[in-house]
Each structure stands twice: as C-alpha cells, then as structure tokens.
Amino acid sequence: MAKNKRGKAIKKILNWRGTCPICKRTRVKLLWEKDGQKVCKICGNK
C-alpha cells in the first residue's frame, strides 16, 4: 500500500480539514477543541 493512501478512509469520516471558525483559515486541520468547537492548532493554543 502506498504511504499517501494510508488512513484516507478515516480522514474522510472524521472530516479533519476545514475552515477554522475563529481565524477563518481555510483547509487547515481542525483537531483541537475550544468552547465546544473544532479549531486549528494556532487558535487551540491561544
């Protein structure tokens, strides 16, 4: 299996990438929770 295909099905289900509701950045990983919302790494560490 090619390395770039690993975990592709899981990423689609979890919807990791999107637009951060706080800073409005697009196509970023939304893995951190802040005030009940999924936010990007920069906003999650503030």
Image (spheres, rainbow, N blue to C red):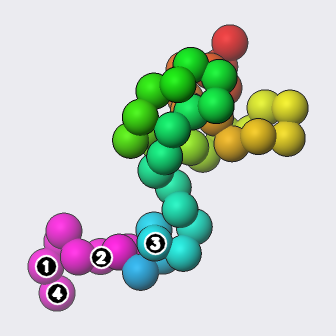
Q: Estimate the spatial distance between the alpha carbons at disc 3 and disc 4, rounded to whole Å.
A: 18 Å
Dot 2 falls on a residue whose secondary structure is loop
Q: Which mark is residue 1?
A: 4
Q: What amino acid does circle 3 point to?
A: Lys
Q: Are marks 1 and 2 in contact (CB under 8 Å)?
A: yes
Q: Which residue is mark 1?
A: 2
Dot 1 falls on a residue whose secondary structure is loop
Side of 16 where 5 appears, left or right = left
> Can you say whether 19 is above or below 2 in the image?
above
Q: Earlier in the sequence, mark 3 or mark 2?
A: 2
Q: Which residue is mark 2?
A: 6
- Which-is-in-front pick, marks 3 and 2? 3
**In magenta segment, residue 7:** yes
Viewer-closest of 26 and 28: 26
Q: Estimate the spatial distance between the alpha carbons at disc 2 and disc 4, rounded to whole Å.
A: 7 Å
Side of 28 where 5 appears, left or right = left
In the image, farthest residue toward the right:
35
Q: What amino acid does circle 2 point to?
A: Arg
> Can you say whether 26 is above or below 46 in the image?
below
Q: Residues within 10 Å of mark 2 (few under 14, many from 20)?
A: few
The residue shown at (64%, 31%) is 21
Q: Are marks 2 and 4 in contact (CB under 8 Å)?
A: yes
Q: What amino acid does circle 4 point to?
A: Met
Q: What amino acid does circle 1 point to?
A: Ala
Q: Are marks 1 and 4 in contact (CB under 8 Å)?
A: yes
The residue shown at (16%, 87%) is 1
Q: Residues within 10 Å of mark 3 (few under 14, many from 20)?
A: few
- Measured as percent of width and height from the top left, residue 38 is found at 69, 42
> Can you say whether 45 is above or below 9 in the image?
above
